């Protein structure tokens, strides 16, 4: 019960190490060229993680004309992550994998006279194409880019050549911080700001944005989730409607574990942004570590919903699912269509 993108097989045409922890992949569709993508778009990839196929999303880098008919993505290796980056880093030139057509939940407004871009770490990937597209349209753009070390500023050299002083970088190991409040104050009212990075950057941008009385709709974001505030361990999940109890291990998401157990969950972004995978909480013995950016602070405090793609639990949780069996027709059992809770066509 996911979004239903068009899939094709792509070959790894080239691999480039951009930083000690960021690797760029050029993916060439077999039998054709890449589908042109707008700035901010991403690909879904099917990877073998923990012994089975799982879906991961990665932002497309740059503009289509720069990739020569291929897709370009960059992946930061996270050894303590859910396994997707390790699976990507295990690929070699010539390997193949299924990739989706480009999708875009982070659309860029090319007609805005001025735009502000904020990037943290690997969050630079969608903003590279945004900055170039805005410059090509003759629009004013400023890009603030923070990373833990100078060596981790992927694409900074090329961006500096294009943007000049409109690119501002900050390196945490040198004690530098991005002046979000100052950058937002310099932005004309009504102009958009695009943020991509860890949840901490988004939280800081949201606070600075609201403090200056900016319209919430003008702050647009994409994130790769929070690292969490609680220890990452296994937890137990019950789904009474399916007669299901399972243990979610540390390296697997709740969403992946439910899907592996045959519990269908609506999902799309798989990054805690769209809220499509939010499930109702029936009971909780412990604490929810909300790692999404979809639920409000009030909803998180209420602990009545959980975004299955990124959030975790310390303890045990009982969830409801969207599946509902229909009442059987008079004189006979429910049809397969009814049992799946889908409309019945007469």
Image (cartoon, grey):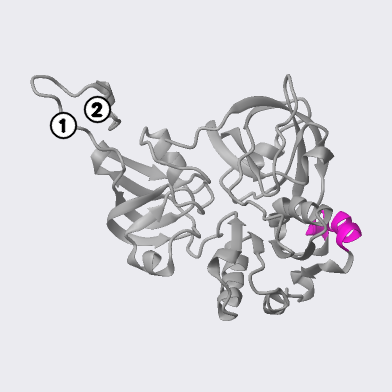
- In the image, residue 210 above or below residue 24: below
Q: Residue 341 carries which label?
A: none
Q: Which quarter of the figure is the N terminus placed in?
A: top left
**Local SS, label 2:** helix
In the rendering, which numbered label is found on residue 338?
A: 2
Q: Which of 290 and 266 is in front in this view?
A: 266
x 77%, y 25%: residue: 94
- Residue 147 visible in the shown view: no
Q: Residue 3, image x and y in percent?
A: 49, 37
Q: Nearer the viewer, residue 256 or 328?
A: 328
Tell me how far mark 2 sits from mark 1, CA to CA: 8 Å
Q: Name the residue under label 1.
A: 327
Instruction: For label 1, count other residues whose C-alpha is less than 10 Å away and answer few (under 14), some (14-19) or many (20+).
Output: few
Question: Residue 135: which quarter of the image?
Answer: bottom right
Q: In which quarter of the image is residue 72?
A: top right
Residue lying farthest to the right in this orientation: 161
Circles 2 and 1, Cβ within 8 Å, touching? The answer is yes
Horizontal side of 130 relative to 163 (left or right) equals left
Q: What stretch is highlighted in magenta?
A: 151-163
- Indicate yes or no whether the magenta region holds residue 113: no
Secondary structure of residue under mark 1: loop
């Amino acid at each position: 019960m996911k979004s239903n993108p068009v899939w094709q097989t792509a070959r790894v045409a080239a691999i480039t190490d951009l930083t000690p922890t960021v690797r760029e992949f050029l993916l060439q569709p077999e039998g054709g060229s890449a589908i042109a993508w707008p700035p901010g778009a991403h690909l879904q990839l099917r990877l073998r993680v923990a012994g089975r196929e799982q879906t991961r999303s990665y932002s497309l880098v740059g503009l289509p004309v720069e990739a020569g008919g291929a897709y370009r993505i960059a992946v930061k290796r996270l050894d303590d992550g859910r396994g997707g980056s390790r699976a990507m880093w295990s690929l070699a030139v010539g390997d193949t994998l299924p990739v989706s057509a480009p999708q875009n939940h982070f659309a860029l407004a090319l007609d805005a006279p001025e735009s502000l871009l904020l990037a943290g770490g690997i969050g630079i990937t969608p903003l590279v194409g945004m900055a170039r597209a805005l410059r090509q349209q003759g629009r004013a753009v400023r890009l603030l880019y923070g990373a833990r070390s100078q060596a981790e500023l992927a694409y900074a050299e090329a961006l500096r050549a294009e943007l000049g002083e409109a690119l501002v970088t900050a390196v945490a190991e040198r004690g530098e911080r991005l002046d979000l409040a100052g950058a937002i104050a310099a932005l004309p009212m009504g102009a958009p700001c695009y943020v991509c990075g860890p949840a901490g950057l988004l939280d800081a941008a949201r606070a600075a944005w609201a403090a200056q009385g900016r319209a919430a709709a003008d702050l647009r974001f994409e994130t790769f989730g929070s690292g969490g505030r609680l220890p990452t361990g296994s937890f137990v999940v019950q789904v009474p409607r399916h007669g299901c109890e399972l243990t979610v291990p540390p390296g697997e998401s709740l969403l992946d574990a439910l899907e592996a157990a045959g519990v269908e969950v609506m999902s799309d972004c798989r990054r805690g942004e769209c809220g499509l995978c939010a499930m109702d909480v029936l009971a909780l013995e412990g604490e929810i570590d909300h790692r999404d950016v979809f639920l409000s602070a009030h909803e998180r405090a209420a602990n009545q919903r959980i975004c299955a793609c990124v959030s975790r639990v310390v303890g045990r949780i009982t969830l409801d699912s969207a599946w509902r069996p229909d009442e059987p027709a008079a004189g006979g059992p429910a049809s397969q269509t009814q049992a799946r809770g889908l409309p019945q066509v007469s």
